[in-house]
Amino acid sequence: MKKQSFKMLFHFLLQHCPTDGREVEQPPELWTRRGEDAKMDCSHTKGAGYYQMYWFRQLPGESMRLKFSAWKPDAHSGSFSGVSRGTLTVKNVQPEDSGGYFCAVSPEAVFGRGTKLTVLAPTRVKVLSPSEKECSSGTKTLVCVASGFYPDHVSVSWMINEETVSKGVATDSAATRYGTSYRITSRLTVSSEEWTSDIKFVCSVTKGSTVDKSSL
């Protein structure tokens, strides 16, 4: 009987969610590195009668799902201070936890506008030497492979002896998704003379304020 009542309440909340977000406040965005704990705050001005708080998660392409309530803890944890403020903690976040998190208070369901959680995964960068099978056309091609990052917004650049170059650079137009992370490749074509000389080649991958590098 209790389980059936809970399901009825769950559907009621989903059907009565329109709100302008002013009475239930949430931060619009939260960026967290993979493996850390993500804490999202929620507060409301509905008064003491709204003493129940719920957190819903909506992943890209999926429907909204209840993740935490006062009597239904999930893999996540939460707290409710008094009647006007609460916090949802997503522990040890992974890229697949990225999505929208919506706070609602009841008995008359009022939703916030949601917090967009983005989990940042570290970038692995590797520069590969020219292939031994490469035709002897007077040029050599170095390949930079950046993988394991999330989300997909990165930029790739090349340096030769600490000077940024654009000539001979060809980078994928967009990153390709592999599971829960992304991968992108960039190629630098140089002359055989440059390759055989004592020259340092560096590939840099920039994501926000973070720069990861690999060199040959």
Image (cartoon, rainbow, N blue to C red):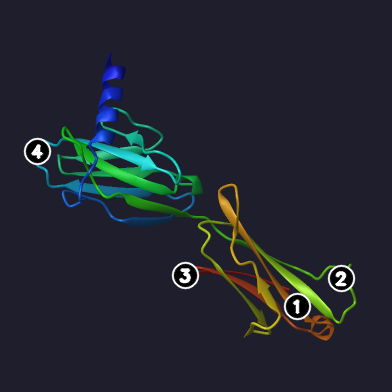
The residue positioned 31% from the left and 18% from the top of the image is 3
In which quadrant will I find the C terminus? bottom right
Residue 169, above or below 97: below
Q: Which residue is mark 3?
A: 209
Q: Residues within 10 Å of mark 4 (few under 14, many from 20)?
A: few
Check contact, mark 4 vs mark 3: CB within 8 A.
no
| Amino acid at circle 3 | Ser
Give the label, 2 or 4, closer to the camera: 2
Q: Earlier in the sequence, mark 4 or mark 3?
A: 4
Label for residue 189? 1
Quadrant position of residue 190: bottom right
Instruction: Tally the marks.
Output: 4
Give 195 or 3, whichever is nearer the viewer.
3
Q: Position of residue 159 (x, y in %)?
A: 65, 80
Give the label, 2 or 3, closer to the camera: 2
Q: Which residue is mark 2?
A: 134
Q: CA distance from mark 2 to mark 4?
A: 73 Å
Give 209 or 142, whichever is nearer the viewer.
142
Q: Secondary structure at mark 2?
A: loop
Q: Residues within 10 Å of mark 2 (few under 14, many from 20)?
A: few
Label for residue 48? 4
| Amino acid at circle 2 | Glu
Q: Earlier in the sequence, mark 2 or mark 1?
A: 2
Q: CA distance from mark 4 to mark 3?
A: 43 Å
Q: Earlier in the sequence, mark 1 or mark 3?
A: 1
